[in-house]
Image (spheres, helix red, strand yellow):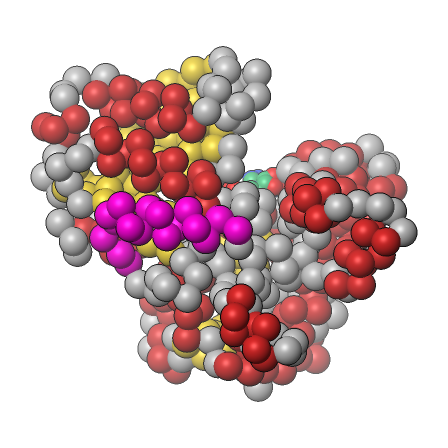
Amino acid sequence: MTAGTVLVLNSGSSSIKFQLIDPETADAPAHGLIERIGEPDGRIIFHHTTGTEEHLGEIPDHRTGLRKVLEMLEGLGRPLEEVGIVAVGHRLVHGGDRFYKPTLIDDSVVQAVSDLSVLAPLHNPANVIGMEVAREELPDVPHVGVFDTAFFHSLPPAAATYAIDRDIARENGIRRYGFHGTSHEYVSNRAAAFLRRDYGELNQVVLHLGNGASASAIAGGRPLDTSMGLTPLEGLVMGTRSGDIDPGVLMHLNRAAGMDVDEIDRLLNRGSGLKGLSGVNDFRALLALIADGDADAKLAYDVYVHRLKKYIGAYLAILGGIDTIVFTGGVGENNIDVRRDSLAGMERLGIVVDPERNEASGGGERRISADDSQVEVLVIPTDEELAIARAAVAFA
Ligand code: ADP
């Protein structure tokens, strides 16, 4: 390991992703994932330079999980102080109006992120635990928060403003914040580099399709719109989240079905999207159901793709023409069908996917559009950890 390693932590609602990474070379001597925290069948995958370890068994909470990560890093043969961690970068979800650039974490930042949990109940509490435990375990290096909302802080007012009473909106911090910003910024920069074009002159639509999913319209490196809003619930259909829905549905559920606000919250955040429609939230499981002829799964897929198309069309209009469409995230990077179907029938708009390129195996940055497509359609694997490591090392 080199002297300039950054530990990047992404503490999610039921998982922790971790990576030791050299921000200059992008070498990652160790990385891994703890998943299904709080469930009986927890799992840790730990990749390091000499191999991969898998541990199965219950991981009761984030604190236990994070301590286990640090133990495993020490198990590589050297105490943590000697591993050369110069900073810890934390992926933080909701920065509200307060945080819009990488921020050195102190007690007041932890408290502020905790206070913002009301806006991101699935994410900010897990982020807070991640910061607390990591600061206890690694007290001598800077801890830096990189916020998912930061890139979209400069959204134009017309895109950031909800059409509700202006005083109520102002008093309650209600605006479109946008999320996955680190990813949208990273892949749009990589897309420009891939095309050998100036970032400042490209109109891009970026589709980040993972468990959470979001779209953005980026003109010359500046976001003009994005699909997630006050919370990461708005926009595209996601694994367990509904995305866009008539707000009247919420009132109806309350009045007609007697559901209270917490029940509606749980329904829309955890029991909707692909899971609500088909029973499964993982895209690979959805595809398996479709292959078995499951009609609900097929409808879930169709709803997912239809919503995606709507956003692509809307952003095409907002940008007044686009140079590139970029797919990223677990689904965007791997799923042939979603890429094909979400762009099907757009030939007259200058968007033509090449079937062979789309279906070619192998990862990495690649073009999947046909040579005669006016719009370059790209697959760019996201690397939020590298982007976070680069931001964090600036404080070391
Ligand atoms: P997160 O939002 O948690 O970072 P990811 O970006 O890792 O999520 O994406 C997870 C999603 O990607 C899951 O729905 C998973 O099924 C899907 N996915 C991952 N690999 C593949 C694949 N090879 N084919 C289809 N879907 C995939």
Ligand 1 resides in the quarter of the picture at top right
| Residue drawn where x is 64% and y is 38% of the image | 282
Pinpoint residue 263: horizontal percent, then vertical percent: 72, 42
Q: Is 123 or 189 nearer to us in this picture?
A: 123
Left or right, residue 371 beside residue 184:
right
Q: Is 237 or 12 nearer to us in this picture?
A: 12
Q: What kind of secondary structure does the magenta stretch mostly adopt?
A: helix
Report if residue 29 is visible in the image: no
| Residue drawn where x is 49% and y is 59% of the image | 179
Q: Is residue 99 one of those drawn in magenta?
A: no
Q: Is residue 238 above or below residue 98?
A: above
All told, the count of numbered labels is 0
Pinpoint residue 61: horizontal percent, then vertical percent: 46, 24
Left or right, residue 351 beside residue 380:
right
Pinpoint residue 178: horizontal percent, then vertical percent: 51, 63
Quarter of the view holding residue 325: bottom right
Q: Is residue 295 above or below residue 182?
A: above
Q: Is residue 113 one of those drawn in magenta?
A: yes
| Residue drawn where x is 82% and y is 33% of the image | 292
Q: Is residue 56 above or below residue 169?
A: above
Left or right, residue 181 beside residue 72:
right
Residue, far top: 57
Image quarter in which the N terminus is found: top left
Residue, far right: 256
Residue, far bottom: 320
Query: Magenta stretch?
Result: 102-118
| Residue drawn where x is 43% and y is 15% of the image | 55
Report if residue 66 is visible in the image: yes
Pinpoint residue 277: horizontal percent, then vertical percent: 79, 44
